[in-house]
Every structure is written in structure tokens, then in C-alpha cells.
Amino acid sequence: MLGPDRNTQARPRNFASCSGCNLCLLVCPVWRRTHDFALTPHGRAKALQHGAAAADLAESIQGCTLCGACEPVCPEEIPLIAMTLDLRRQMPQPAAVQELRTRMEAQAGHEPSPRSGPVRALLPGPALRGRPDTMERAVALLGGTGSIRLADDDGADIALALEAGSTIASRRMEQFLRPLRALKQMVIAEGLLLRHLRPLLPGAALISLGEALSRLDAVRGALRAGDLYVIEPRAYHGDYQRLVRHYDALRAASGCAFNLDLQRIAVPATARSLPQRLGLETIDDGVQLRWIMQGRKVTRIVVEGVEDHAAFEGISALPVVHLADLADDGAS
């Protein structure tokens, strides 16, 4: 089982540590959409402090988007993402998750062929694989196939299982991790997967696709002052103290607006619950997207995440460009 992505051994913190400051409400997309206290991290903490069980909080636990915005603002340093995932593990798994586990167990029986080549790899995830032209441009920007390879197994099933709080068979996890241990650097598009792989692969440098591309001169030079740059929140909040400096420098150099609030927390564009991720409920990102766009005067939207690309195209007439396509955008 994957452990929490924050160090809780030196200073154990849990929901009992919640002081009720309500700072997590200020950044929670579920609170912004529903104004239902019970569906927030604070609401879950208080319910558990008063004896509630995971089954009593099913709607709240499944409704969490795992965006991670609550963690950097929590003065008690509670590892809220890891603890929400632990609560999901305590709940009955929906049929869609049971089917996922069956597929993972079947896949674990197929050993990958050994591969030689670059010691850097891109784990694109299903959303980026669904846009092959964008994926190819990302590979080219990161040095081309002679410098970085596309991972044959990018752990898409593991990422979804993590989302659901499902137990991952040790055989499947080992099958996924074995070829990754030989790599020195991994660029990972799935923010939740990135957070959980860091403690499992301490010998490799792991970086988000957004950070990797936004460090390149070709990409930075294509940004302009009229852009709204949309940071992928899961990777950002999982390494907030370091990445906040990176994006502050990028904002100063480019003049872009960012999806950052006054606390420099990334406002998620696609804030989706577990049932929505599993395809059990209709996805509607309109409220969140319009909140981000409210009052802004921008001429183009630049996104790190493929999901955000499709979502913004659905509500805005402005051009929307993925970071990997930025240098090729005719409007640059």
C-alpha cells in the first residue's frame, strides 16, 4: 500500500489535530460550489472528532477532488490528501473500482520486456495519450526520443486506483516500479501519481510535466502578458514550498496572470469528485471555470493539463493552448 506523501512520523498529525480555523474552506473547490460545511476537510475533521465513521461521511469523502489546496494552508500540517485516501479505503468499493482491481490483477501477469535507452522517461497518462500530437510535441521539447522515452506502462490504472483509495496488489505495483528504478529522471503528467511515487523512487528526480516544460526557454519565450496560465494543482500543492517560488519567478518574467489566489494557492480548473472520475456522475466544471475567469482581462488561456484544455474550450471563446503546443501556436 502506498503511504502518505508528507512526513507524519516526526510530527504525527491527523484529523484530531484540526483546530477549526476554517482556512481550508477558503481554498476548497467543493465549498465554493456547494457551501456545504459537511463536504469540506474541516467538516470531515469535526465529524470524525465527534465519533463519525467513514461510512457516515461517504458523500464528503467521495466528493473530495484531491486537488491538495487545503494542505499548504493548514496550520496544523495535517496530511489531508493521504488521510482522505485512507478514509476511502475504509469504505465499500463501487463496482467500477472492483472491475479496475480485476483488470490490474490480470495485467500483473504480463511481465514487460527489458528496455535499454534513455534514463529519462515521460509518464503521460491517458489524458495526454489521448492527444498524440501534443504528446509528441512534449517529447520533442524535452529533448526528443533520443533523450527521453515514453513509458510503456505509465501506471494509468494505478493512478485511478489511488484516486479511489483502492488497495493495489503488490505484484502489480512491483511490475510498474521495476523498470522505473533504472531511470534517473521521470516527467509525470498525473499530479496525484507524482505525489505518491516520490517516496517509492527516492533515487530518481521526479518532476511534473508542467514544471518541466515551463523551465524551457522555448516555452517561456512564447508566454505573453495577456495569457492566463493555469497550473495543474495536484503536483503544485504536493510540492508547494518549492514550486511557489518557481511560478512566482515565471510570473515576474512573463507578465502572465495565473490561477493563483491571494495565498498563492492554485485554484483548480477541473475539480472532480471520485464518482465523476469513475464515470458514474456527469462532469460539470462550469462553476469552477467561471470563478477562475471572473473579472479577468486575458487574451489567451495556457494550460498545463489536458483536462483543463478541453474544459476551458467548453466555456470560453478565447484560444486555449496546452503548454506543449505553445511554441507552435500561431498566435504566439
Image (tube, rainbow, N blue to C red):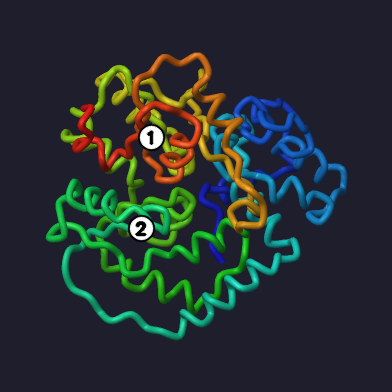
Taking depth in this image into account, of 110 and 321 the one nearest to the observer is: 321
Q: Quadrant of residue 50?
A: top right
**Label 1, residues with CA under 10 Å away: few <14, some 14-19, many ≥20:** few
Residue drawn at point x = 40 percent, y = 45 percent? 306
Mark number for residue 129? 2
In the rendered image, the quadrant that contains the N terminus is bottom right
Secondary structure found at label 2 = helix
Residue 293, position as x, y percentages in the image: 49, 22
Residue 159, position as x, y percentages in the image: 49, 60
User: Is 78 displayed left or right of 289 in the figure?
Assistant: right
Amino acid type, callout 1: Arg
- Pointers 1 and 2 in contact (C-beta within 8 Å): no
Asked if residue 11 shows in the view, the reply is: no
Q: Residue furthest bottom?
A: 109
Closest to the camera, between mark 1 and mark 2, is 2
Residue drawn at point x = 73 percent, y = 35 percent? 42
**Label 2, residues with CA under 10 Å away: few <14, some 14-19, many ≥20:** some
Residue 123, position as x, y percentages in the image: 34, 58
Residue 163, position as x, y percentages in the image: 57, 56
Residue drawn at point x = 40 percent, y = 43 percent? 305
Mark number for residue 305? none
In the depicted structure, whether residue 296 falls above or below residue 98: above
Q: Residue furthest left?
A: 146
In space, the residues marked 1 and 2 are separated at their CA atoms by 28 Å
Label 1 or label 2, whichever comes before in sequence order: 2
Residue tagged 1 = 242
